Each structure stands twice: as structure tokens, then as C-alpha cells.
Image (spheres, rainbow, N blue to C red):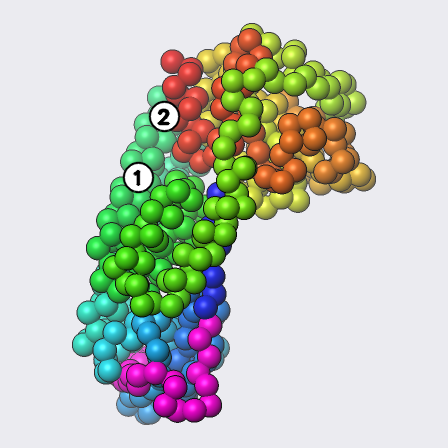
Amino acid sequence: MAIVFVACDFKNPDKPGDQGEPFKISGTITNSNSTIVYLEEVPAGNSEGTIVDSSVIGKDGKYTLKGYARESLVYNLRLSQNSFPLAAVINDVPEMTLNVELSRENNQFAEKYEVKGSPVSQEMKDFMYTFNGDLQKIYIVSRQMDSLHKKNPADSSIVKLIAERKQLGDEIKDFSINALNKAKDPALFLFELGYYQSTANGFRLEPVDIREVNELITEATKRFPAHQALKAVKTRLDEQLTQMKQSIEPKWVGKQAPDFSLPDANGKQIKLSSFRGKYVLVDFWASWCMPCRAENPNVVEAYNKFKGKNFAILGVSLDNPGEKDKWLDAVKKDNLTWTQVSDLKGWESAVVPMYDFGQVGIPYNILVDPEGMIIAERLKGTGLETKLAEVLK
């Protein structure tokens, strides 16, 4: 479940005395073609910053940037032509040194950077370097899995790599949770939480669920009671929890799955009840739904792992009228090799009110046992594999 972090943009007022405490960042930038470096203030949970200062980069690479802040925030250093920031710091001290060496091969990226005088900025750097190093390990395993899939390997080979990747993912999550619990600064806490959550989907890590996020933020507000950005995030999260309470709790577990019949790509009517005798995951999705497409690799992996164990998937698309080609193209691109059906009516499909997931949205799924009883719903990421492993022994 996505957690939206509030962007708390504390604008500097015209009156200098109300701007907060001054801070200064100075150092050198080497291998740069730019003449100006910018300082961006990045509000909590926002990927885009607001420029608060700029500095000419001397011939010797030296620069000095200044800012004011009422509380600790994350700041990026950015060159005008670069898509990515050079480095990030937190204003925990009045003065710090930040030396950046850009890559000679591609000066869009920093080859390395060194921060002095700011313990919290150093802690943030250490977090990112460790986190990204572990992500690289997951990337390597994923590449190995892709190569194996093309060779029709033995199931044992794939299962071993799946287990290895899951272990790496669990280690990254444990590392991140530990870092959050030890964070010495509220801006660092918010940065680390956002960094993990925003990365989780793209690398198929297990996100920190909304209840655990709430516990982490509640504890952080006790440690840093005066931090306004953290308070704002907590307030917004409380609102989300209230709004989501109904959708979080299972509606269908323990109930008989309502039967339905929808046409496949060839027009043949397929009934859910035709899968009776098997465990079947009914997966509601659509080609236009980006979260669905991002989740599809997890579903593919689960299917490949359990398809020989009395398990099937019935994909139910909510694609729109006249968009059959888009539906089938997505099925092919995402390698969805199980049964797919759709009446191409979008949200007007009869299955939406039948299963009452209009407010929850898609991706949405239910797991039906061989007797037609629903035993789980909204299974995502590693949670899907865990549940299947539990029932398909």
C-alpha cells in the first residue's frame, strides 16, 4: 500500500530574522564543465527541490553556498545541466565541507564525494552507499535469473536464485529499519524512509507496510517532537489510515467466491468455477495500470514457481472498450502465460461491484481454495509467494 509523504515546503519569508539559522557549505567540485552550482532545499517526501542559493565555481573548483533553515532539512547540490544531484547533505551544523569529484567518463554523476564537519550528512551518505551496494547484488542475481529463464532451466536452479534474491531483499529491509530506529536527525529519518519505500517497488523489495510506517513515524515524533515536517507527515499519515481503514481489513476471507463468466481473447466464456479443484489466484489488473504492470513480475515469478502444484491464475483485465490490442500487447510483454479474460468495459465491468474493489483500486487479487472459498486477498510482492508456499506444500 502506497504511503504518501507530505511535502512541507517552509518558504523563507522576506524578513531575514524569520528565516531561521544560517548555514554554509563550501568545498571543491572537480571534473565539471559547469560554472555554477545550485543549492536546493528538498521538502520531506518531495523529489524536486527549491533553489535557495547558487555559487560560481572557481577555476580551482572552489564554491561556497549559504542558506537559512528553521529546522533540519535535506539539501541537494546540483549543476544546471545535470539530471541528477551531485550529493545530498543535511544542515545539522553551521558550516560543513563538501568535496565532489565528477566521473570523467560521464560528468552527470559524482564518482565520489566527501563530507566533513556534518555527522548527520555522513550518516546519510553511509546509508545510501550501503543500500545501493546491496541493490547491486540484487541486480546481479536478477540478471542471472533472466539468463536462466531463456534456457528453460531446472526448477531447482531458479528456486535457488529466488531464495538468494529474497534473502538479499530481507537484508536490505532489515538494514533500513535498523537505520530508521537509530537515526539521529528527523530529516535523516524521513530521507531514509522515503529512500527505501521509493526503491522497493522498482527492485521488488517488500515495502514497509502502512502499520509499520505508522509505528516508525510515531516513535520518531517522540524522539523529535519539535520537527514540523515530521509532524506534518504524521498528520497526513493519520488521515490516510483513517481513509484506508475499511480497505485494509479483509472483506472476502472466509467467504465463498462469487462466480462470474467473462470472455477470453478469442471470445470463449471462462467461468471462475471452472477452476474448482485447484487453488486459483484471481488477479484484477489492466494494461493502463502502472502499479499493476510493476507488480506483474512478482505474479509471473510466483506462477512459474507454483504452477505444477495444483495452482492456477485467472487474469481479469479492466481494459477499456476498443483497447483489446493494448490488453493483449501487455499480456505478451509482461509474459502473462495463464488464462486471461476481459469484457473490455473498464471500471464498468460487472466484476468490480461483485467483488467491491472500486475504492481499493487495482492491482487487486483474491486467492480461492479448491472448494471455492476465498482464503486471502490483496497479496503482493513477497507476500504472494509466502502465502502460496504456505498452502501449496
Residue 156, position as x, y percentages in the image: 35, 21
Tell me which label, 2 or 1, sits earlier in the chain.
Answer: 2
Q: Residue at x 64, y 27 (%)?
A: 355
150 left or right, relative to 332:
left
Q: Which mark is residue 159?
A: 2
Mark 1 — residue? 170
- x, y (%) of residue 94? 24, 82
Label 1 Cα crowd, 10 Å radius (few <14 / some 14-19 / many 20+): some
What secondary structure is marked by label 1?
helix
Give the spatial CA distance, label 2 vs label 1.
16 Å
Q: Position of residue 232 (x, y in %)?
A: 43, 62
Q: Is residue 281 left or right of residue 358?
A: left
Q: Which residues are magenta?
A: 9-33
Q: Is residue 5 above or below residue 211?
A: below
Amino acid type indicated by mark 1: Asp
Where disc 2 sits, the SS reads helix
Q: Residue at x 46, y 79 (%)?
A: 11
Q: How many marks?
A: 2
Q: Position of residue 106 (x, y in %)?
A: 40, 69
Q: Is residue 108 visible?
A: no
Q: Are marks 2 and 1 in contact (CB under 8 Å)?
A: no
Q: Is residue 16 magenta?
A: yes
* Horizontal arrangement in the rendering, residue 108 relative to residue 365 (left or right): left
